[in-house]
Image (cartoon, grey):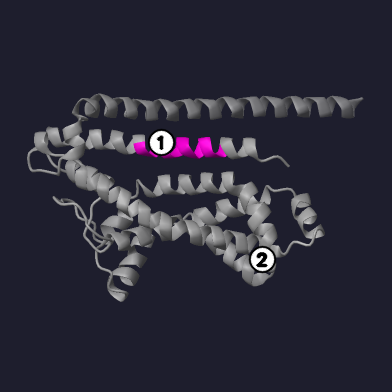
Amino acid sequence: MAKIKTRDAYLKRRKIKDFAFSCVALLLLFFSLCTLLALLIDMAITGAPRISYEFVTNFPSRHADKAGILSAWVGTLSVMMVTALCAIPLGIAAGAYLEEYAPKNGLTAFIELNIVNLAGIPSITFGLMALGLFVYRFGLGQSILTAGLTLGLLVLPIVIVSTREALRTIPSHIREAAFAVGATKWQVVQHHLLPYSTGGILTGVIISLSRAIGETAPLITVGALTFIAFLPSGPMDPFTVMPIQMFNWISRPQADFHVNAAATGLILLGMTLAMNAVAIYIRHRFRKRVRW
């Protein structure tokens, strides 16, 4: 009888602690969301009146009322295109190899550990590595190609991890059934595993690109310009991107440039939310199409 009472008292204390922890977690979450919402509202109130067709189609200028983000958003799209071409094929191939082909030994475990660690290191580290490797060693200069390769290396671990996680969600009986009818390993991966995991892979890819689109530190390190009044014509041309344009304007003392920075932030936020919305839509479509 005493043991039952002791157990009941212990369970009651655990429930009280769990409830207290849930309350604290909800309060912290509510505080974080309120802080984020306040920042977004302030940025919207400040920058929304500045957004116009002229603002999107004009080049930067010394005069705040005539300045625009044409070179910045074109540079952003150009860099993201190079990043996608660099990171997506290599990341998916590496993830599929590590998950389906690589032997389970110490070397593979070491590689997997380093991939996970690379996904969490500061982005400035990739910028310093790219400065020594792409700019000085390979002589690519301060170009769109250098920036795209830098961000490609930055998001590559995320693409690899998301690809592996998507492949792991496929039930083992899919593989066993394919092998049972005489399919080779490559046929199983090509015709079954990759199609079934496309939704998860594309979701990870777009989320990784959403992270890359807002990066500033590695691009400043490799020599992105803060003021550029022409459009790049090729991958070896100088460039600027929207986060750096924002940094340039917010560092000026004039209040009108701060309004421009807020408007640029709203447009950049809209682009990021649009990419995440596309990821959610793609995931939903592929989950409806795939039936195991």
Q: In the rendered view, would you say 184 is above or below 201?
A: below
- Contact, CB < 8 Å: mark 2 with mark 1? no
Q: Pinpoint residue 244: horizontal percent, then vertical percent.
A: 24, 48
What's the magenta region? 271-283
User: Is 83 placed left or right of 25 in the picture?
Assistant: left
Q: Quadrant of residue 131?
A: bottom left
User: Is 21 placed left or right of 261 in the picture?
Assistant: right
Q: In the rendered view, would you say 185 is above or below 69?
A: below
Q: Which residue is mark 1?
A: 274
Between 90 and 227, the residue placed more toward the observer is 90
Between 195 and 58, the residue placed more toward the observer is 195
Q: Which residue is mark 2?
A: 101
Work out which residue is located at the far right of the displayed protein and give it: 1
Q: Pinpoint residue 11: horizontal percent, then vertical percent.
A: 77, 28
Work out which residue is located at the far left of the displayed protein and give it: 63
Between 178 and 40, the residue placed more toward the observer is 178
The kind of residue on which mark 2 rests is Tyr
Q: Which residue is at 50% across, 62% downward?
A: 90
